[in-house]
Amino acid sequence: METILSTQYDQDFKSTIPHIANYPELLPFVGKNWETSKRILFLGESHYLPYDKLKAYSSFDYFQNWYEGNSFGLGDIYRKYIYTRNNVFIAENGTHEKPLSIYFNLKTALLELPEVSINQEVFSNFSFYNYYQKPAYIKGEKHENRSIQPDLIDDKVAYETLLRVTALTNPKVIIFVSRKAYKSFMQMYSTRNESILKNIKIDSVPHAGRQWWYKKSRSYGDRTGKQKFLDLIKEAYLN
C-alpha cells in the first residue's frame, strides 16, 4: 500500500517541523498523485491513545512534555496508534485490519464521486494528517470525551505545523474534518492573517466519525456533514 504514497517531502518535513524528526509516525500522508491532483488536504483532529493501558510505558509528564520527547516513550505496542500513514493504508486496503471510522467514512464518501472513483486508489490523490500534533490520551475504556483537550502550546504547534506543511506542499484546498480543529485554526489565523494561506480555499466539516457526519444541520445549509464534504470536493474538481 506504500505505492499510494509520495515521500518526496519527507526530508523537508523533518527538517522544517521540529517535532517530526522525533515522531516520524506523524509524517503527513501525501498521495503519490499529489503534483497532478486538485491538491486537496484533509485535516483530522488528533490521534488517540488509551492512557490507562499506556501508563505502564509512559508517565503523565511524558504527555505534558510531548514536544520535547520522542515516540520511543510509547513503546513498540502503542507507537502504531499515532502512525498517520498506516491508518490511511489500512483504509485504502480495506481487507485486513478494521480502519478507523474517520478514514473509512472519508473513503466511502469519496467513492460516491465519479471524479474520484475512476481511480483505483482513492487516497493517492489527496493528502491527510491530524491537525493537533499531540494525541488525546483517554483515561478509561469508555471515556465520554474522546476529543483532545488542547493547551495553548498544542494550538500553537498545530497552527505552525500547518503553515510549514502548506509552504512545502502548496495545497489549493484545505478541508478540516473536525470542527474543534477548525475553530482553533481560525482563532490563530484571525490574529495573524498569514499571506501564505490567502489564496487557499479553507473550509470545515464535522468529524467524519461522529454523528453530525450523517445529521443535517442549519450551519451546513441543511446538509449533513457528509453532503457538505462532497459538495466541497465537487467544487474543487470543477476549478
Image (tube, rainbow, N blue to C red):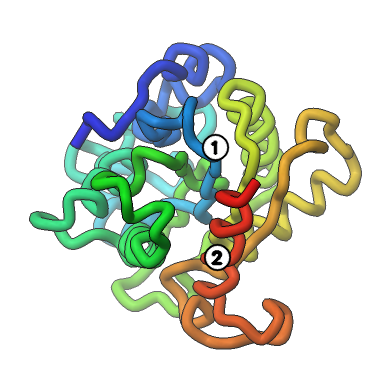
Q: What residue do we see at 70% from left, 50% from top?
A: 202
- Residue 36 left/right relative to 170: left
Seen at 68% across and 57% down, the residue is: 203
Q: Amino acid at mark 2?
A: Phe
Q: Which label number is shown at residue 190?
A: none
Q: Given the image, on which type of amino acid does mark 1 rest?
A: Arg
Q: Which residue is mark 2?
A: 229
Q: Quadrant of the N terminus?
A: top left
Q: Is residue 172 above or below residue 202?
A: above
Please state the horizontal and vertical placement of residue 167, each as a whole percent of the image. Answer: 66, 23
- Number of dots carrying numbers: 2
Q: How busy is the neighbourhood of tag 1: few (under 14 within 10 Å), some, or many (20 plus)? A: many
Give the CA separation, mark 2 to mark 1: 15 Å
> Image quarter for residue 62?
top left
Report the disc number at residue 39: 1
Q: Residue at x 56, y 50 (%)?
A: 237
Image spot of residue 177 (x, y percent): 54, 60
* x and y, in percent, of residue 52 in the image: 30, 61
